[in-house]
Amino acid sequence: MTRYEGAAPPQTPAPTLEVNHVTKRYGEGPTEVVAVRDVSLEVAPGEVILIMGPSGSGKTTLLLMLGALLRPSAGEIRLDGQVLTALSEGRLPDVRLRRFGFVFQDFNLLSALSALENVAIVAQLAGVPNGAARKKAAAILTDLGLGERLHFLPEKLSGGEKQRVAIARALVNDPTFILADEPTANLDSKIGHEIMRLLRRVAKEQGRSIVIVSHDQRIKDIADRVLWLEDGRFAHETGMAVDPVCGMQVERERAVDGTWDGESFVFCSRGCRDEFLRAPWRFLPEGGAHRAALREAVREEARA
Amino acid sequence: MIWLAARNLFQGRTRWVVSVGGVTLALMLILSLDAIFVGMESQLTAYIDSTGADVFVAQSGVRNMHMAVSSIPGSVEGRVKAVDGVDVATPIRYVANYITLDGQEFIAYVIGVPVDGALGRPLTVADGTRELRPGEAIVDGVAARAAATVGATMRVLGRDYRIAGASTGLSSIFSSIAIVPFDEFPSYVAADTMAYVLVRAAPGTSASDLTARIEAAVPGVAATTRREFGRQEIKVISDMATEIVAIMNVIGLVIGLAVMALTVYTATVARRAEYGILKALGARTWTLCRSVVAQAVITVAIALALGAVFTLLVAFAAPRLGVALALALSATSLAKAGGVALVIAVLAAVLPIAQIARIDPAIVFRRRIA
């Protein structure tokens, strides 16, 4: 996947999104509802965070606040050190337009516009001239496998294609952060997984941070971190790691542990662990941190 | 954003066609009415312009013909003729009444002109002769068309006349014109009186100088240049029509506004969620409002063009269908209709703009908030 023309070079220091003790209340007095309570979170560059939780747990409210669509009642949100919550209403659209990309559950494409126009219009809103906006939109859509569907209206696209258009739209202004609200809810499991892998690829290859709100347990494996939100608070955090044998994302808490050369590895099963320990050189890069141990292990294997 | 406006408009084709149709009809009402009055203005002075007179002399205080009564003594003719700078002076009599042709009645300006008078008859006729002889008449307008042929009989104020000539272009929407011999003018006009004296200025004499000289020399008369006489004629009609035109313009404005406002409002409400999406993505309210205004302006611009085209078609067709209407579409009328169209577009966009301004971009997520 390529970075598109006009993409901002990596910034120093790396862009971050920090949520510090944020609370959101709706109503007041006896009717007051606290949707999010004293939540803190830091999103690192290139990180994929999945926020899960039951309905009414505050996931969407948190996502709205992250995307500068809703102001917290208390606490602050910092974008690259700048306090987002202190910005005037008039400046927020520009922040949303240039720093965030949004992916919605219902795709939310404009019905009168073609796939190409749905993407190009967001670039135009950011001041890109019509011709350049269309060129850029076409490049992204083609990269996402929609080169043959550029001029199709949304009603002529499948669910997966619509979500790809939505992702292209989210990418067109080269945002640092992509916020996705239940992006797989209207997709079957195969297409849903495809879309999530696509989002992960965007994060890892382009260095964009992605925050996903979802109920879908099946997409946990694409996240770097899974946060469980309940009653407006993060109940627990699940670190995700890749099984070096089968490549699966596995929850650190539930994984099978194995240690080799002083380093801990996590595996989806004992089978994978045993396979790894029998021949670690098959699963680790030759030039990595375990270079010497790997060479020794290979020699021992040869002697045996 | 113009193309977004255009796409939004043309996607709901039926709604858009109804909207353009409604606004077109409203603007056509305004344009047609204006065209009728502009066309009528040239008709109103057609007889005055064709008399060949430079100055019209009437009873003091009278400076036009329509709805005016002028009665001056016969002696005025001689006194006017004696004024320095007068080349020719011809007396005419005048009354508005019905004439009967082929059993049909037509309202007409009945004008009595001396059979040997140099002024007061049409300069040209389409059929027959412009010469007047006792018992003969020249007719113009709807009455002329009804008469069909020269030689037919026309009844004027209880007396029959043979039509000797038929002219075109002198009558108006209000009346036809029938010219009969001065001496045979209906008996209820006093024998030694006339309505106007038509005056041709001698070469080298200006009409305005002549009016001053006549009024100085002949007491109790008003002398008016042909140009001013025509202007006063138009003013009388315009004054009578101003309220009608204003009411029709307001009706046109209200119809157009109602149709447009309803269309733009329903189109905006139907796309409320989409405007919410664009706001969530970072579009400014002002940008979206421009798109709504653009939709309204595109619609009224097309409606204005169609309204102008249809009005021109009516102007072309009306005389060919025997309607005594000369519609003339003027630049002023177009500018006025354009102004009305712009008002319609802007007012029609007000409510939708208020709607858009109120849209919370979080609406995109709202159904599952918290």
Image: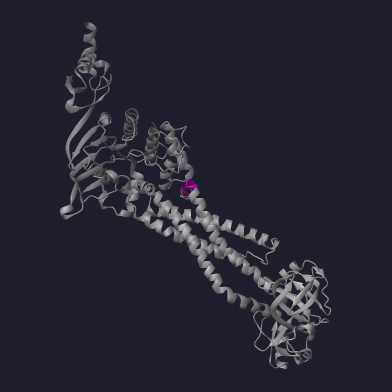
Prevailing SS of the magenta stretch: helix
One can see residue B251 in this view: yes
**The C terminus of chain B lies in quadrant:** top left
At which x and y percent is residue A42? Answer: 22, 40
Is B12 in the magenta?
Answer: yes
Q: Position of residue A127 (x, y in %)?
A: 42, 48
Residue B33 horizontal side relative to residue B161, left or right: left
* Numbered marks: total: 0
| A78 to B95, vertically: above or below | above
x, y percent for residue B31 = 58, 63
Give how far across and how far down residue B169 sits, in percent: 73, 69
Q: Which stretch appears magenta? A: B6-13
On the question of residue A22 being in view, the answer is: no
Dividing the picture into quadrants, the one containing residue B69 is: bottom right
- Residue B157: name its quadrant: bottom right
Q: Quadrant of residue B175?
A: bottom right
Question: Would you say residue A290 sits in the magenta stretch?
Answer: no
Q: Which residue is drawn at 44% across and 58% down?
A: B349
Left or right, residue B302 beside residue B202: left
Tell me: B52 left or right of B248.
right
Front residue of A201/A108: it is A108
Q: Which residue lies furthest to the top in this view?
A: A304
Which of the pair A171/A160 is nearer the observer? A160
Q: Which of the colour schemes (rainbow, by chain, secondary structure, one colour) is used?
A: one colour
